[in-house]
Amino acid sequence: MHDIADLERRGAVGVFLASEAFADAARLQGAALGFPAPYVLVPHPVQDRTDAELRAVAEEVYPSVVAAVTSSTPSAPA
């Protein structure tokens, strides 16, 4: 979150992905930083997934990532 906030303040568009289990933490940290960072949630857990499963998740969230990066306002969680 800190990295994305820093990038955005420098004028670079950024979005971060977080596991659904950390949705509340993402919102709270964004509020604490005073930064409504755009983010996309992915199904939890992430680390146990096979390469094929990770590709499927990436394809699933791709439209949300593109929308978050191209939006002028922070994205709602997908």
Image: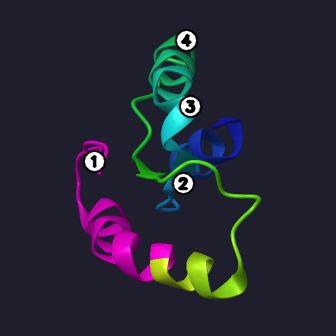
How packed mark 4 is, by other alpha carbons closer than 10 Å (few <14, some 14-19, many 20 or more), is few
Left or right position of 19 against 27: right
In this rendering, the answer to whether 76 lies above or below 12 is: above
Give the extent of the magenta segment.
Answer: 57-78
Residue at position x 76%, y 58% in the image: 47
User: How far apart in space, not on screen, are marks 4 and 1 (Cα)?
Assistant: 18 Å
Question: Do tag 2 and tag 1 residues touch (Cβ < 8 Å)?
Answer: no
**Rendering coords of residue 48 (x, y %):** 75, 61
x and y percentages locating residue 8 in the rendered image: 52, 49
Which sits earlier in the primary sequence, circle 4 or circle 2? 2
Mark 3 sits on what residue?
22
Residue identified by numbered label 2: 17
Where residue 75 is drawn, which disc sits there? 1
Q: Is residue 75 magenta?
A: yes
Q: Is residue 31 above or below residue 55?
A: above
Q: Which residue is mark 4?
A: 32
